[in-house]
Amino acid sequence: MLNSVRVAFVDDHPMLLEGIGAVFARHGRYDVVAKGSDAGAARAIVARNEPHLIFVDLSMPGDVYGAITDIAAAGRTKVIVYTACNSVDLAVKSLDSGASAFILKESISNELFGAVDAVMKGEVFISPSLAGKVIFALKGRRRKEGAAGAKLSHREEQVVALLLKARSNKEIALSLSISEKTVKHYMANLMTKLNARNRVEVALAAQQHVSLIS
């Protein structure tokens, strides 16, 4: 984990924007680098300030999902979506767009730093009240897309086995005595083979046809 985590927030509700910013500002290991109020601001903040994490509210003006996709594709900043909408469809769409976490505002006080820690470890976080439904929805989609026909190498099976135990890329690298860069290479291959958009979908798709190591 980094000694100082650079965070940014984009929300069109000023009071909430100030409140969540103040929560992070009170913790010495977080550096609040920027705030904005629309999708365009999210793109600009990432380009200008290069935060490690950016919190994005789904209800703000502009092409929010497009901004999430662009930010995630650039690879420098992780996106944490937080919203008042308790919706499986929105959670799935956010993850598909490249978000690393989906948090409900109603439970943000209890889940905020857990989500941050998970994302900084390279994991995906979904509010527990929605997680089961989101996983079920993704499983159903994977069945329809026929991911079970993919062939994985033994090493890829090992990576998936550790992924299912919620291991980060760094932890997978240590367990398999390979570099973190190599783990990322395997993860990219798995996403291609399984037609998966993120780590959650890799794990769900692989469960259908891989005999996991113990």
Image: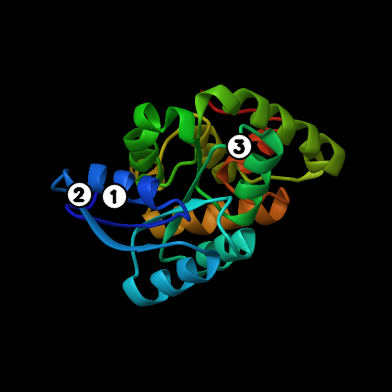
Residue 211 sits above or below residue 63 on the image: above
Relative to the observer, which residue lies in front, 5 or 60? Answer: 60
The answer to whether residue 201 is visible is: yes
Tell whether 94 sits left or right of 12.
right
Residue occupying the point 56% across, 44% down: 199
Which mark is drawn over residue 85?
Answer: 3
Q: Secondary structure at mark 3?
A: loop
The answer to whether the residues at label 3 and label 2 have Cβ atoms under 8 Å apart is no
Residue occupying the point 48% across, 56% down: 12
Q: Earlier in the sequence, mark 3 or mark 2?
A: 2
The answer to whether the residues at label 1 and label 2 have Cβ atoms under 8 Å apart is yes
Residue 27, picture quadrant: top left
Relative to the observer, which residue lies in front, 73 or 64? Answer: 64
Residue bearing mark 2: 25
Dot 1 alpha-carbon crowd within 10 angstroms: few under 14, some 14 to 19, many 20 or more:
many
Could you give the CA–CA distance between mark 1 and mark 3, rounded to whole angstroms?
21 Å
Which mark is drawn over residue 21?
Answer: 1
The answer to whether residue 209 is visible is: no
For this orientation, the residue located farthest to the left is 28
